[in-house]
């Protein structure tokens, strides 16, 4: 199934070079793949996978290993960001 992976801020460095321009990568993943299964091949440090959204809906850390993705979903991930 096809999904869109978006990595923001410093996480975009984990995307292939050609995907860094718009922080977006179209992926073919197994049906029912979870957030963890999609993220694992990119080597993102778990402590940097802070804010996770599927189609704009927050996925709590406790559900990321079990929350299945569906055809056409957009998985967006942000690292912790400090600011003032």
Image (spheres, helix red, strand yellow):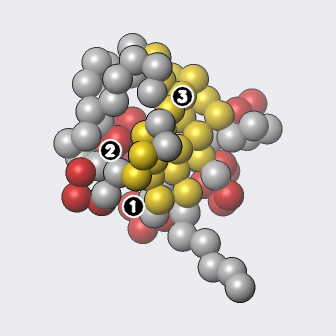
Of residues 52 and 28, the one drawn nearer to the viewer in this rendering: 52
Residue 28, quarter of picture: top left
Marks 3 and 2, the one that precedes in the sequence? 3
Q: Is residue 62 above or below residue 12?
A: below
Image coords of residue 18 (percent x, y): 75, 30
For mark 1, does the 10 Å Cα neighbourhood hold few (<14), some (14 to 19), or many (20 or more) residues? Answer: few
Q: Residue at x 79, y 38 (%)?
A: 21
Distance in Å between CA atoms under marks 3 and 2: 15 Å
Please state which of the two labelled residues, at mark 1 or mark 3, is closer to the viewer: 3
Q: Residue at x 46, y 20 (%)?
A: 72
Q: Which residue is mark 1?
A: 46
Asked whether the beta carbons under mark 1 and mark 3 sit within 8 Å of each other, the answer is no
Residue 34, quarter of picture: top left
Q: Is residue 39 above or below residue 81?
A: above
Marks 1 and 3, the one that precedes in the sequence? 3
- Left or right: residue 11 compared with residue 48: right
Residue 72 visible in rendering: yes
- Left or right: residue 65 compared with residue 8: left
The residue positioned farthest toward the top in the image shown: 1
Q: Quadrant of the C terminus?
A: bottom right
Distance in Å between CA atoms under marks 2 and 1: 9 Å
Report helix, strand or loop for mark 3: strand
- Left or right: residue 47 compared with residue 84: left
Q: Residue at x 39, y 36 (%)?
A: 38
Image coords of residue 15 (percent x, y): 62, 40
Q: Which residue is mark 3?
A: 4
Q: Residue at x 61, y 72 (%)?
A: 81
Report helix, strand or loop for mark 2: helix
Marks 2 and 1, the one that precedes in the sequence? 2
Image coords of residue 35 (percent x, y): 35, 41
Q: Which residue is mark 2?
A: 36
């Amino acid at each position: 199934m096809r999904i869109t992976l978006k990595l923001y801020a410093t996480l975009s460095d984990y995307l292939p070079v050609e995907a860094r321009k718009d922080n977006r990568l179209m992926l073919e993943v197994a049906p029912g793949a979870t957030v963890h299964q999609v993220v694992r091949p990119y080597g993102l440090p778990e402590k940097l996978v802070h804010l996770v959204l599927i189609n704009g809906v927050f996925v709590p850390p406790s559900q990321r290993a079990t929350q299945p993705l569906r055809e056409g979903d957009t998985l967006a991930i942000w690292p912790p960001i400090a600011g003032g």
